[in-house]
Image (tube, rainbow, N blue to C red):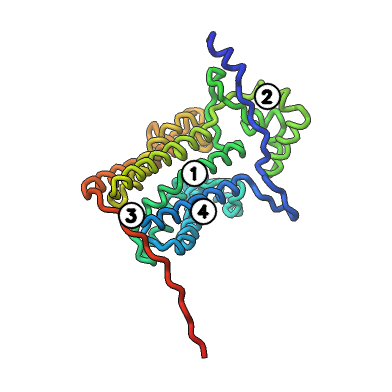
Amino acid sequence: MVFAAPLGLIEIPYPRIDPVALQLSGGLAIRWYGIGFMVAFGVGYYILRRLSRSGFLPLAPDKVGDLLFALIVGVILGGRLGYILFYDFASFAANPARIIRIWEGGLAFHGGFLGAIAGGWWYGRKHNVPFLRLGDSITLGVGPGIFVVRLANFINGELYGRVTTDAVPWAVRFPTDPVAMQLTGADAGRSLRERELLIEQAHQSGLWDQVRGQVPLRHPSQLYEGLTEGVLLGLLLWALYTYNRRRGRDLAPGTYGGVFVLGYGIMRSLMELFRQPDAQFTDAGDPVGTVLGPLTMGQTLSVAMIVLGIWLIVRGVRIGAAPPAEPVPPTPPQITLQG
């Protein structure tokens, strides 16, 4: 306890960043959450083009855009459906109109992962692209996207961590914490935007400074996830890819995907220990919010990823490495004769 007090003096204040990056006329708004996904897909497109040019992705570079479109549809639909089914079915069943309001958040990673698999499988089958190598390429491109979307979660003040103490110098007091929402009156907002504006008003009026000390410190679990599941896992995959390329070989199709799935499952399971449990799964008898024995919903879904990842890696080891493939030439232009 003697060490905790000095650490508390360097507590990092929650940055005042409006979740709406640009307010447009007619009530339309560009949110950081949406920008995060745009950046994620943009960087993913660049990486897939690079893998296509190197021959790792057996697809002509000019076809990567079509693949990306299929993945975008799969991620958004799968992420939304996964969130509804895995996390908040009762609420959406009571108010189905909320289903289309994805700008308010509510995309589950595990659902988006399944959606990306479905979109990639559909595209690969239609265009005769090997699915497992397609999956390897996609997993090499998702690390930056995971990081920037988790940053957007942090800006939104959502998916924050469990309550901690000033012994954690980087702990944060979130204005979206239930205690903070009640003290500032932001919980009176009927819509997401109304609550955000009430929080901003509390900052401008000085009310937040007055009540801030009563708000519990929490782990910034969004940043934990971004740095582990996004940056650390992404660097690990690229180190493995670079190492094998320099040795003049490629791992068996599906192996990189296996490393990603296994790594994400393990890291997500560990980060769930710091993440605030989903309120809909908690009650007086289960404050942790478990859904399967001692596991949270995020850990339960990650167990399936761990099993799949192990299977893919074992399969890849048995098959063995192969020489790197040659790039697929661009699609020749079609010339139509008239007259």
Q: Which residue is mark 1?
A: 144
Callout in the foreground (1, 4): 1
The image quadrant that residue 131 belongs to is bottom left
* Label located before the other in sequence (3 or 2): 3
Residue 329, picture quadrant: bottom left
Picture coordinates of residue 178, whole percent (x, y): 62, 31
Q: Nearer the viewer, mark 3 or mark 1?
A: 1
Task: Note whether residue 303 is visible.
Answer: no
Q: Amino acid at mark 4?
A: Ile
Q: Which residue is mark 3?
A: 132
Tag of residue 212 = 2
Is label 1 in a helix, a strand or a loop?
helix
Mark sitting earlier along the chain (1/2): 1
CA–CA distance between discs 1 and 2? 33 Å
Eyeballing the image, is 31 above or below 122?
A: above
Compute the Cα span from label 4 to label 2: 36 Å
Give the number of the mark in front: 3 or 2.
3
Label 2 environment density (alpha carbons within 10 Å; few <14, some 14–19, many ≥20): some
Are the residues at dot 1 and dot 4 in contact (C-beta closer than 8 Å)? no
Task: Check disc 1 and give the amino acid type.
Answer: Pro
Disc 4 crowd rating (10 Å Cα; few below 14, some 14-19, many 20+) is many
Residue 62 location (% of width, % of height)? 46, 64
- Specify which label sits upstream in the sequence, 4 or 3: 4
Q: Mark 2 falls on what kind of element? A: helix
**Residue at coordinates 24% horizontally, 45% vertically from top-left?**
317
* Mark 2 residue type: Arg
* Residue 208 - label: none
